[in-house]
């Protein structure tokens, strides 16, 4: 039998993606500074799709801390945490993260994707059940898959549906997992209701607050702080460091027992190189700024209101979000792509988000706001959206 070669099979798959308007490739920016990006053909655009909500990613302070630590200690840690890669910078950052989020302890992971895979796999396995919101981040769904536990998905932000699933479920341990702020929609999980349901059924609640940390709650401590939910209500908190903190990496926070257990069995923490100490030094600086500089959150809040008010005046199809994630629903992938290109021609960089990242028929422009933006940037974007969206 004559089997097709690898490139032959892949070319066919790629052609299908192209035909469906779903082909993706990285779009390069030569540089980004504050709200501005430089395109390869030398034009300046205003970036409205980064996760740099507080404007810290290109701030010189964390960058200087990183540069100094790199000069002192080099560019890499040299090994995994359990071997010889663990440094004072990692421990200091873990202490800062635990204090910020009001947890006993925290454990640093290389990325949020790895944190979610490692934590879910460490906590549950065969015979257990993971219950997840339908719109959870891909890494949370993948974590449930590799854990070997049974995966059940409840309707988006629907604590009653979760309640009904838990009622019927016979798993030995049950882990309820949700995004805090949903990454592609910008709305918030109903955490107090989810915590009540989880408690009633003796299930454990895990929240990934990647997009709430730095933005919501007092001192930017996130959606859990805003909702007043402590370690007893939400025993497993995951946060990422590459969104509002403008750095790179992730962490899990909770009881000392949880952290000790993860050190024993979270494979994506054990079998990987520890982040560079310089990266941790940068993150500590960014965390201090995110915690102490309320003006960034205040300004961001004003921009969110300005954008929503302006979009309502233009009858743009907004979603129910109070966060800096303000997606504009378009529908078909091709239309979203065309709108994104038209915006770029007008000087605004807003990537089209298409299936499979979002459900079919809900392609969107995922507009995000940042404390780096000024009022006139938002007004300009609104004008361009009014012109560029299909009507
Ligand atoms: C971005 C994101 C992640 C992944 O974090 P990385 O550090 O970028 O790997 C995980 N969960 C959610 C909800 C996210 O938005």
Image (cartoon, grey):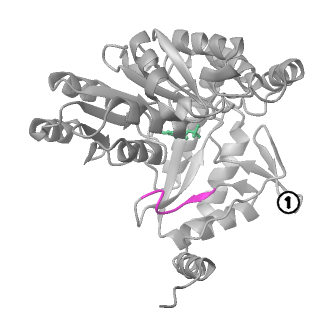
| Residue farthest to the front, as pictured | 1
Residue beneath disc 1: 40
Asked if one can make out residue 154 in the rendered structure from this viewpoint, the answer is no
**Location of residue 294 in the rendering, given as x and y in whole percent from the top left corner:** 62, 17
Front in this rendered view, residue 243 or 339: 243
Residue at x-position 31% and y-position 33%: 124
Q: Is residue 352 magenta?
A: yes
Q: Tell me if residue 122 comes above or below residue 307 in the rendering.
A: above
**Location of residue 285 in the rendering, given as x and y in whole percent from the top left corner:** 73, 17
Prevailing secondary structure class for the magenta stretch in the rendered image: loop
Asked if one can make out residue 96 in the rendered structure from this viewpoint, the answer is yes
The picture quadrant for ligand 1 comes to top right
Q: Is residue 154 magenta?
A: no
**Location of residue 345 in the rendering, given as x and y in whole percent from the top left corner:** 75, 65
The span picked out in magenta is 351-358
Residue at x-position 54% and y-position 70%: 22
Query: For the residue labelled by badge 1, is the local secondary structure a helix, a strand or a loop?
Result: loop
Front in this rendered view, residue 131 or 86: 86
Residue at x-position 46% and y-position 22%: 264
**Location of residue 87 in the rendering, given as x and y in whole percent from the top left corner:** 70, 15
């Amino acid at each position: 039998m004559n089997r097709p070669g690898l490139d032959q099979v892949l070319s066919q798959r790629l052609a299908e993606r192209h035909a469906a308007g779903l082909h993706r490739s990285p779009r390069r920016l030569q540089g980004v500074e504050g709200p501005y990006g430089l395109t390869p053909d030398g034009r300046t655009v205003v970036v409205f799709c980064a996760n740099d909500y507080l404007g810290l990613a290109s701030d010189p302070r964390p960058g200087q801390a990183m540069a100094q630590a790199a000069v002192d200690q080099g560019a890499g840690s040299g090994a995994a945490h359990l071997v010889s890669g663990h440094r004072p910078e990692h421990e200091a950052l873990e202490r800062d993260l635990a204090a910020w989020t009001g947890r006993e302890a925290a454990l640093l992971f290389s990325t949020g994707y790895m944190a979610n895979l490692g934590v879910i796999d460490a906590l549950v396995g065969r015979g257990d059940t993971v219950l997840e919101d339908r719109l959870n981040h891909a890494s949370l769904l993948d974590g449930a898959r590799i854990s070997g536990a049974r995966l059940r998905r409840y309707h988006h932000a629907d604590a009653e549906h979760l309640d009904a699933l838990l009622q019927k479920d016979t798993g030995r341990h049950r882990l309820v997992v949700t995004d805090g702020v949903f990454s592609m929609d910008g709305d918030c999980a109903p955490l107090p209701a989810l915590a009540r349901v989880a408690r009633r059924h003796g299930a454990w609640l895990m929240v990934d607050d990647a997009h709430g940390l730095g933005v919501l709650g007092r001192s930017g401590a996130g959606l859990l702080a805003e909702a007043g939910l402590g370690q007893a209500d939400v025993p497993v908190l995951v946060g990422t460091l590459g969104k509002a903190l403008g750095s790179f990496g992730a962490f899990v926070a909770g009881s000392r027992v949880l952290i000790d257990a993860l050190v024993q069995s979270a494979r994506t923490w054990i079998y990987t190189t520890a982040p560079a100490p310089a990266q941790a030094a940068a993150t500590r600086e960014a965390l201090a700024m995110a915690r102490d500089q309320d003006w960034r959150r205040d300004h961001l809040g004003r921009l969110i209101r300005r954008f929503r008010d302006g979009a309502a005046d233009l009858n743009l199809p907004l979603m129910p979000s109070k966060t800096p994630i303000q997606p504009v629903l378009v529908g078909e992938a091709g239309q979203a792509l065309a709108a994104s290109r038209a915006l770029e021609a007008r000087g605004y960089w807003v990537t089209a988000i298409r299936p499979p990242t979002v459900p079919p028929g809900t392609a969107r422009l995922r507009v995000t706001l940042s404390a780096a933006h000024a009022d006139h940037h938002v007004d300009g974007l609104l004008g361009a959206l009014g012109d560029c969206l299909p009507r």
